[in-house]
């Protein structure tokens, strides 16, 4: 079983941490309790957050690095990880948490505020400015959606899993300014930017050390950032054309 459900983003969780707890933490614990009492669930793979559970960091974070989340979103994700360990120790429920980098790509719905890459692309193709939180130096590890899917497939199909957490990312950090430059290159024209203050709960740098995934499962991402953004530009452009055709 794969647990991907989340009703919040880092921004909305900060605005309303109680809802994040009620919907995502309590909901996840109820799900784990059901799985622990259901013989048909052989393994549960949880979608955690590599971008928030470690907190503010310097350099790539490995799974044994300290976890010091500074946002309600990361706190909730880490709490679910701890409950995975609780149910494993008390009922034998086999589980693993994948600490994901920032996923993006085909399939992300338009009109959302989550994910700078699809938001920047949609705004640029629609003639709107890109809203940058901070000065553009904020660094993240980005991973194309097919590489995210391949990591989940590895965890479902693996006969044995040695650890309860794995980082899933590119292992390379890119600033927001670099993302804007790459998007501009793919769409073929400059992007106007508007700068706003970043929320205090947003970490300045998040890059994942993925050597555990590479060494144990020979997993590594296949899609480069430029190729992934190029694919996402084509996807968003098709979706915008479909929207225009229906109006």
Image (cartoon, helix red, strand yellow):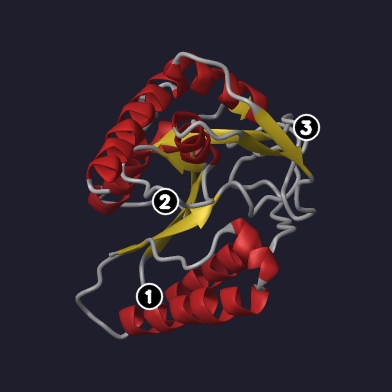
The residue under the point 71% across, 37% down is 205
Mark 2: few/some/many CA within 10 Å (<14, 14-19, 20+): few
Cα–Cα gap, marks 1 and 3: 47 Å
Q: Position of residue 54 (x, y in %)?
A: 67, 50
Cα–Cα gap, marks 1 and 2: 15 Å
Marking on residue 92: 1
Q: Position of residue 104 (x, y in %)?
A: 43, 39
Q: Secondary structure at mark 1?
A: loop
Write down the quadrant of residue 132 in the picture.
Answer: top right
Marking on residue 135: 3
Mark 1: few/some/many CA within 10 Å (<14, 14-19, 20+): few
The residue under the point 45% across, 37% down is 122
Relative depth, front residue between 25 and 196: 196
Q: Disc count in the image? A: 3
Cα–Cα gap, marks 2 and 3: 41 Å
Mark 3: few/some/many CA within 10 Å (<14, 14-19, 20+): some
Q: Of all residues shown, which one is farthest toward the left?
A: 40
Give the mark, 1 or 2, whose residue is nearer the N terminus: 1
Q: Which quadrant is the N terminus positioned in?
A: bottom left
């Amino acid at each position: 079983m794969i647990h991907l459900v989340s009703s919040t983003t880092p921004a909305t969780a900060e605005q309303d941490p109680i809802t994040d707890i009620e919907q995502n933490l309590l909901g996840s614990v109820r799900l784990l309790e059901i799985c622990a009492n259901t013989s048909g669930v052989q393994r549960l793979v949880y979608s955690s957050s590599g971008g928030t559970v470690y907190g503010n960091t310097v350099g790539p974070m490995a799974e044994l690095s300290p976890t010091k989340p500074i946002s309600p979103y990361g706190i909730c994700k880490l709490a679910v990880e701890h409950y995975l360990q609780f149910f494993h120790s008390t009922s034998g429920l086999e589980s693993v948490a994948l600490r994901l980098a920032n996923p993006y790509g085909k399939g992300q719905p338009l009109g959302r505020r989550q994910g700078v890459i699809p938001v920047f692309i949609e705004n640029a193709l629609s003639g709107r400015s890109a809203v940058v939180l901070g000065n553009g130096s904020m660094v993240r590890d980005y991973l194309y959606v097919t590489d995210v899917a391949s990591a989940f497939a590895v965890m479902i199909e693996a006969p044995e899993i040695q650890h309860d957490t794995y980082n899933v990312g590119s292992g390379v950090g890119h600033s927001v300014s670099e993302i804007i430059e790459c998007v501009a290159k793919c769409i073929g024209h400059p992007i106007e930017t508007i700068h706003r203050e970043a929320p205090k709960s947003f970490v300045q740098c998040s890059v994942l050390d993925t050597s555990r995934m590479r060494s144990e499962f020979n997993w590594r991402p296949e899609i480069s950032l430029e190729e992934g953004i190029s694919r996402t530009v084509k996807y968003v452009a098709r979706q915008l054309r479909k929207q225009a055709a229906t109006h």
